[in-house]
Image: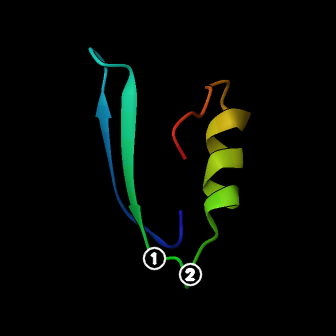
Amino acid sequence: MEGVAKATVSIDDRTVDVEYEPSDVELDVIVTAIEDQGYEVDGR
């Protein structure tokens, strides 16, 4: 996804950490993309 520099997934912890450039992509766009894949987003 444009604006996302890095995404690190932990299967064991069931988490993902996303590094992104706010001037290139809004957080809501990232959250929606994750939720569209069937995942829940917490801890914004």
Whether pointer 2 and pointer 1 mark residues with C-beta atoms closer than 8 Å, the reply is yes
Q: Which amino acid, by three-letter code, is at mark 2?
A: Asp
Total labels: the figure holds 2
Coordinates of residue 14 in the picture (x, y in percent): 38, 20
Q: Examine the rendered structure and indicate whether residue 38 appears above or below residue 18.
A: above
Coordinates of residue 34 in the picture (x, y in percent): 61, 40
- Which residue sits at x=45%, y=76%? 21
Q: Which amino acid, by three-letter code, is at mark 1?
A: Glu
Coordinates of residue 31 in the picture (x, y in percent): 64, 47
Coordinates of residue 44 in the picture (x, y in percent): 55, 47
- Would you name the residue on which mark 1 appears? 21
Instruction: Name the secondary structure under disc 1.
Output: loop
- Which residue sits at x=61%, y=26%? 39
Q: Examine the rendered structure and indicate whether residue 27 appears above or below residue 42.
A: below
Residue 24 is tagged as 2
Q: In this view of the protein, which residue sits in the foreground, 12 or 1?
A: 12
Does residue 5 appear to the left or right of 32 in the view shown? left
- Which residue sits at x=40%, y=53%? 18
Does residue 13 appear to the left or right of 30 in the view shown? left
